[in-house]
Image (cartoon, grey):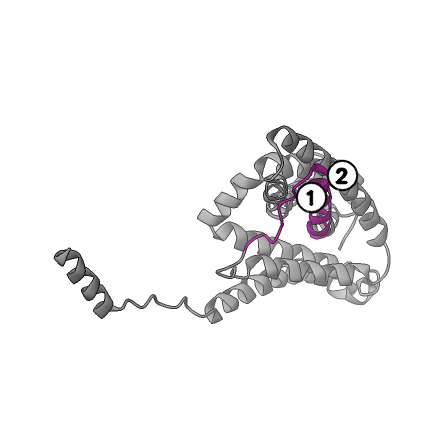
Amino acid sequence: MHTPLTLDPLNPQFWVAVLQIVVIDILLSGDNAVVIALACRNLPPQQRRLGIIWGVGGAIGLRVVLTFFAVTLLTLSYVKLVGGALLMWIGIKLVLPQAEDGGHEIKAAGNLFAAIRTIIVADFVMSLDNVIAVAAAARDSVFLLIFGLALSIPLMVWASQLILRLMDRFPMIIVGGGALLGWIALSMAIADPVVKPVLEPVQHWLSWAAPALGALIVIVTGWLAAARRPAPAAKIIDLAAADDESEGDRHA
């Protein structure tokens, strides 16, 4: 049901995992470049590059530690169940409609070290979901874990703002990404050492039915949240005040 992947270019499952990791990195690395820009925007021009370099360097170090902790943790009982639940929540959160006043609550830093600290802390928080998702998609393959980590770095630095613009223009990208996370979430949960022996008799159909259910849960939850979201209040125009103003303009 959930066997480790080997570096085998002839294995279609290997390329499916590669594609999953690419999509996960694109979706979950999207905010990092924005955070970097916001944290460094008050720095003098000559310090901005240093802030980005040192901030990203510290963030990469944190991702390495988180990635290899994830490898160890995912071999323990109940961890894949908890990780699957967390990943499902992340997928649902991704497709939920944004609030009108939503945005990045990242304060601009006034000096280089404050900017670096802000970047590292923010990236640490945002990297937790990335590391869990990539570790699940990698299916115990160290090569794929390293690939996911290496891919996240240029995406974090160079491509994130483009991805954010594409998400704004094509919202279905976000929905598809959330569905992918739901798919991976239940794939990981049913592979936990606690439940795997129990589910062994039905693994021939559960191995595809459970992931499909996870994707469906994310899509339906996002659709229901969007349907229940109140419509923006209509702007009320005072016609009498507008008439008085236009009358005053004519007399002037």
Q: Tell me whether the residue at label 1 lies in contact with that at label 2, contact meaning CB atoms closer than 8 angstroms.
A: yes
Q: Position of residue 164 (x, y in %)?
A: 53, 45
- In the rendered structure, the answer to whether residue 99 lies left or right of residue 17 reads left
Q: Mark 1 and mark 2: span between their CA atoms?
A: 8 Å
Q: Quadrant of residue 62?
A: top right
Q: Quadrant of the N terminus?
A: bottom right
Q: Position of residue 205 (x, y in %)?
A: 67, 61
Tag 2 or tag 1, which sits nearer the N-term?
2
| Along the line of sight, the residue nearer the viewer: 165 or 239 | 239
Q: Look at mark 2 in the image and give the residue it sits on.
A: 58
Q: Say whether residue 190 is visible.
A: no
- In the rendered structure, the answer to whether residue 65 lies left or right of residue 22 reads right
| Along the line of sight, the residue nearer the viewer: 22 or 67 | 67
- In the rendered structure, the answer to whether residue 91 lies left or right of residue 244 reads right
Q: What kind of secondary structure does the magenta stretch mostly adopt?
A: helix
Q: Secondary structure at mark 2?
A: helix
Please give the name of the residue rendered at 50% of the width and 48% of the height, measured from the top-left corner: 167
Q: Residues within 10 Å of mark 2 (few under 14, many from 20)?
A: some
Amino acid tagged 2: Gly
Q: Look at mark 1 in the image and give the residue it sits on.
A: 119
- Magenta residue span: 103-130
Q: Give the residue furthest to the top.
A: 46
Query: Residue 131 lies in magenta, yes or no?
Result: no
Amino acid tagged 1: Ile
Query: Residue 110 lies in magenta, yes or no?
Result: yes
Q: Quadrant of residue 64?
A: top right
